[in-house]
Image (cartoon, rainbow, N blue to C red):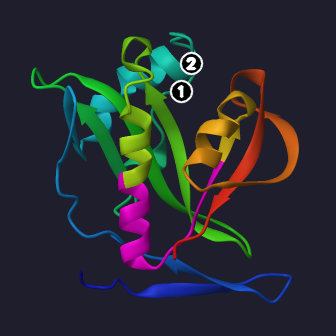
Amino acid sequence: MQRVRDRWRRTRTGLVVPVPTGRWWSPVEPTGVPGGTVREVDPADLVGLRRAVLRDGRADLPASYPWDSEPSTLHLGMVTPGEQVVGCVTVRVDPWPGFASLHLVLMAVDASWRRRGVGRALVGTVQESATAAGLDVWAAARTGALDFYRELGFTPAGDVFVAAMDLPHRRVLWRHS
């Protein structure tokens, strides 16, 4: 992998985190999972799933964002042989000062595909890419998903807060090794 030029950000605590300014990941090799493949996808292909799962189908709430088109944003999807995206995650450069450079956002799995390893495969691919780049990952996890993130090596940090859809969330942190 060709390493992108990183900016470094010093935090109030004196800790420094790398801030990639461009593509920070190597090409993601498609990974087979029962029923589909995890691979890089176009963000436009994720809007319907994001809206259905994360916004309760509400058209008045955003399901795409300006940073979707930034070159430093990675979009992964679990795609069936029929080309249906049944799971997705986006990773953007959004430092949590002193802790991590990458922000895992907009993780969604179609209800009929849950508990089949889709989310685990998506996050595992993010972790492999982040490890190869030497970067840590954080997320604002719904409190109902904290056990899922713990099982994948994330550590809860900070207090519970209300975020998207007025649901309780908590930050979780994963450090590459």
Residue 144 percent location from the top left of the image: 70, 27
Query: Residue 89 in magenta?
Result: no
Q: Is residue 44 visible?
A: yes
Say which of 70 and 73 sits in front. Answer: 73
Q: Nearer the viewer, residue 35 or 54?
A: 35
In the rendered image, residue 86, in percent from the top left (x then y), is placed at 31, 24
Mark 2, Cα crowd under 10 Å, few <14 / some 14-19 / many 20+, is: some
Query: Is residue 86 left or right of 31 when viewed as pictured?
Result: right
Dot 1 falls on a residue whose secondary structure is: loop
What residue is shown with label 2? 55
Q: Residue at x 44, y 60 (%)?
A: 127
Residue 23 to residue 15: above or below: above
Distance (Cα) linking label 2 and label 1: 8 Å
Q: Percent position (x, y) of residue 161?
A: 85, 38
Which residue is drawn at the image coordinates 46% and 53% (left, top)?
91
Q: Quadrant of the N terminus?
A: bottom left
The numbered dot on residue 17 is none
Which quadrant holds residue 2? bottom left
Q: Which residue is mark 1?
A: 62
Q: Give the quarter of the image for residue 167.
A: top right
Marks 1 and 2: in contact by CB < 8 Å? yes
Characterize the local packing of mark 1: few (<14), some (14-19) or many (20 or more) Cα atoms within 10 angstroms.
Answer: few
